[in-house]
Image (cartoon, grey):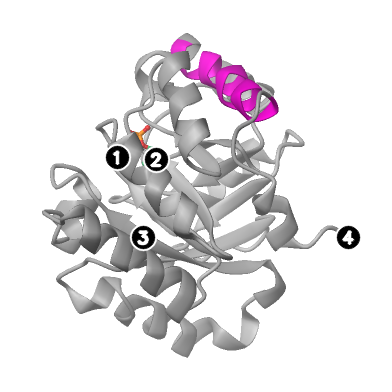
Amino acid sequence: MIAFSDRYAAWRHVFKLDPDRAISDEALERVCLSGTDGILVGGSSGITYDNTVELMARIRRFEVPCALELTGADSAVPGFDGYFVPMVLNAKRMEWLVGRQVEALAEYGAFMPWELTAAQAYLILNGECTAAQVTEARTALTADEVLAYGQLADRLWRVPVLYLEYSGAFGDMELVRKVRDQLTQARLFYGGGIATPEQARVAAASAHTVVVGNVIYSDLNAALATVDAAKREIVAGGPA
Ligand code: 1GP
């Protein structure tokens, strides 16, 4: 059996689906058969056990690997291929760094499938996005601070995934690349504003894994076009 860490280490492109947003069966089928490396299930608001389990069951009709970003005990749905537990490094509200995770572990720690679970250090860099508002993230960071957060996650805490979250806005790719280049063991996930093949290509050249979300709901064909663009960039000499 392939270890979960080996699986996501090979992801170049993933789609993120939000349990709180409607998607037709036809659109979901196209997403799942797109050739993407995985589906991440997660969102910043309105996530419940019921809408998470429903979306998982629909994705499960396809073979694509599917992981859950577990942001609260109430949406801890069994049956995913893997689980990411986000910890928002620059959240002002402590509960998003360690509070909710401790609450969830106090309840479900004994049942956690640890071999399928990875911590995800989140750095939210778009102050406008819902995740920034919910966590009251301190997003006005200098490049040096961003790099320092990267070191904290990668070297000090040895978190396996660092996620640069620009949700809704295309980020600073030069900075993303700098962060990736200093990582020693963590995988760099980048998400935010990817809506064209060219953006997917540039992001894939700057991060290990690119995450495409919103555009699935606004322009499905554009979303599907990001898959090849991201994966081709890697073949053409993207990050190892
Ligand atoms: C959101 O990082 C993901 O959590 C993807 O961002 O929705 O802007 O594509 P977009």
The x, y position of residue 232, in whole percent, is: 64, 21
Q: Label 3: which residue? A: 122
Residue under the point 54% across and 17% down? 224
Q: What label sits on residue 90 in the rendered view?
A: none
The residue positioned farthest toward the right in the image shown: 1
Q: Is residue 23 visible?
A: no
User: How far apart, in angstroms, are the residues tagged by discs 1 and 2?
Assistant: 6 Å
User: How far apart, in angstroms, are the residues tagged by discs 1 and 4?
Assistant: 33 Å
Q: Quadrant of residue 33?
A: top right
Residue under the point 65% across and 55% down? 80
**Do callouts 4 and 2 mark residues in contact (Cβ within 8 Å)?**
no
Q: Looking at the image, is 172 positioned above or below residue 179?
A: above
Q: Quadrant of ligand 1?
A: top left
Identify residue type, mark 2. Answer: Gly
Q: Nearer the viewer, residue 119 or 182?
A: 182
Q: What label sits on residue 167 in the rendered view?
A: 1
**Between discs 1 and 2, the one toward the N terminus:** 1
Q: Label 2: which residue? A: 191
